[in-house]
């Protein structure tokens, strides 16, 4: 999987298939539009898979530390 991490300006990502941001409070959040320009056609498969994997790990951690 090709991944690019860094600071980007909108022009850098207009042609991307998928864009997401990650943070402690937002987890993995898809970016589907920038400046009224649509990014991809919907929340992508990779973004959904990463979010599901992240939530599974968090759930397992919480269960193990109860």
Image (spheres, rainbow, N blue to C red):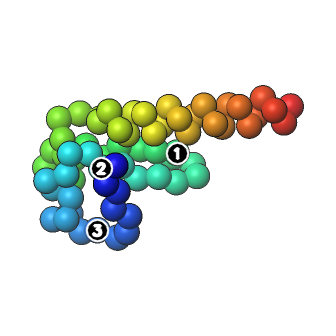
Across and down, in percent, residue 33 comes to 22, 47
Label 1, label 2: how many angstroms apart (C-alpha)? 14 Å
Label 1, label 3: how many angstroms apart (C-alpha)? 19 Å
Q: Secondary structure at mark 3?
A: loop
Q: Secondary structure at mark 2?
A: loop
Quadrant of the image containing the C terminus: top right
Picture disc at residue 27: 1
**Residue denoted by label 3:** 8
Q: Secondary structure at mark 1?
A: strand
Q: Is residue 24 above or below residue 49?
A: below
Picture disc at residue 57: none
Residue 19 visible in the current orientation: yes
Picture disc at residue 19: 2
Left or right side of 65 for 23: left
Q: Count the numbered circles shown.
A: 3
Counting residues from the N terminus, which is met first, the one under dot 1 or under dot 3?
3
Across and down, in percent, residue 34 comes to 21, 53
Counting residues from the N terminus, which is met first, the one under dot 2 or under dot 3?
3
Label 2, label 3: how many angstroms apart (C-alpha)? 11 Å
* Residue at point 53%, 35% (across, down): 53
């Amino acid at each position: 999987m090709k991944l690019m991490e860094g600071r980007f300006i909108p022009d850098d990502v207009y042609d991307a298939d998928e864009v997401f941001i990650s943070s402690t409070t937002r987890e993995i959040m898809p970016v589907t539009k920038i400046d009224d320009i649509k990014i991809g056609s919907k929340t992508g498969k990779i973004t959904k898979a990463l979010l599901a994997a992240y939530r599974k790990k968090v759930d397992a951690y919480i269960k193990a530390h109860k």
